[in-house]
Structures are given as structure tokens and as C-alpha cells.
Image (cartoon, rainbow, N blue to C red):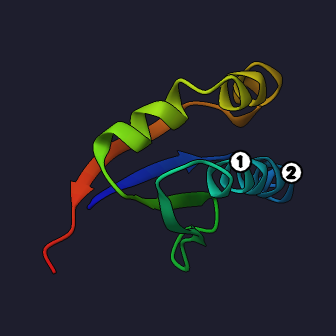
């Protein structure tokens, strides 16, 4: 099962607003076919580093979410305010 890891580093003082924006993206993912689960995390060492981890049935389901009109609309509204994406990486589970 593919697992997507998104890492965003945000300026201090803007973390709460960015958390809300990423939570909205995670809520969109939950509505997509093939979505298996996800978490939203903040680093204990660096509270400006946020991670969103989502698990998908297969790579096709993840790709369909990336191409979805819902995510596109969210990105147009929100992505420029989040700042640069530090990392986007797809992993495979080993269990």
C-alpha cells in the first residue's frame, strides 16, 4: 500500500493557520475512493515542521486524488499561503 508523506515548513507565528489549511486537505483526502487513513503531525523538535501522512489502497487511488477537482480548488485557494513544500515522497508499507 502506498503511503504519501508531505512535509511543510512554515514560519513561526503562522503554524496554526497552516495547520487548519492542511487539515482541510486531509479532510478532502478522507472523501476519496481508495483512501485508507492518514495523520497530521507536528515535530516536537521543530514545531514549524508539519507532516501529513496518508495511506492509499494503491498508487492509482493516490493519483486520482492528486488530479481531483476538489484538491485542485483547495490548492488554488491555499497552497501559495502555505509556503514551499519541503518534501513530497511516496513510500510502500512493508507489512
Q: Residues within 10 Å of mark 1 (few under 14, many from 20)?
A: some
Which numbered dot is residue 6? none
Looking at the image, residue 81 lies above or below residue 11: above
Foreground disc of the pair 1, 2: 1
| Residue 87 visible to the viewer | no
Q: Which residue is mark 2?
A: 17
Q: Residue at x 47, y 32 (%)?
A: 64
Residue 28 in the image, given as x and y percentages of width and height: 71, 47
Query: Measuring 26% from the left and 61% from the top, which residue is drawn there?
Result: 1
Q: Earlier in the sequence, mark 1 or mark 2?
A: 2
Give the secondary structure at mark 1: helix
Residue drawn at the location 46% of the way across and 53% of the way down: 34
91 left or right of 39 in image: left
x and y, in percent, of residue 25 in the image = 70, 47
In this view, 33 is above or below 86:
below
Quadrant in which the C terminus is drawn: bottom left
Out of 57 and 73, give the one closest to the viewer.
Answer: 57
- The answer to whether 19 appears left or right of 32 in the picture is right
Residue named by callout 1: 28
Amino acid at each position: 500500500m502506498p503511503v504519501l508523506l508531505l512535509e511543510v515548513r512554515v514560519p513561526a507565528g503562522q503554524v496554526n493557520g497552516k495547520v487548519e489549511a492542511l487539515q482541510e486537505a486531509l479532510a478532502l483526502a478522507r472523501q476519496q475512493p481508495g483512501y485508507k487513513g492518514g495523520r497530521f503531525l507536528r515535530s516536537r523538535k521543530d514545531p514549524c515542521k508539519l507532516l501529513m501522512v496518508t495511506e492509499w489502497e494503491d498508487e492509482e487511488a493516490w493519483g486520482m486524488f492528486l488530479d481531483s477537482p476538489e484538491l485542485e480548488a483547495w490548492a488554488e485557494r491555499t497552497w501559495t499561503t502555505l509556503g514551499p513544500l519541503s518534501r513530497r515522497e511516496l513510500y510502500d508499507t512493508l507489512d
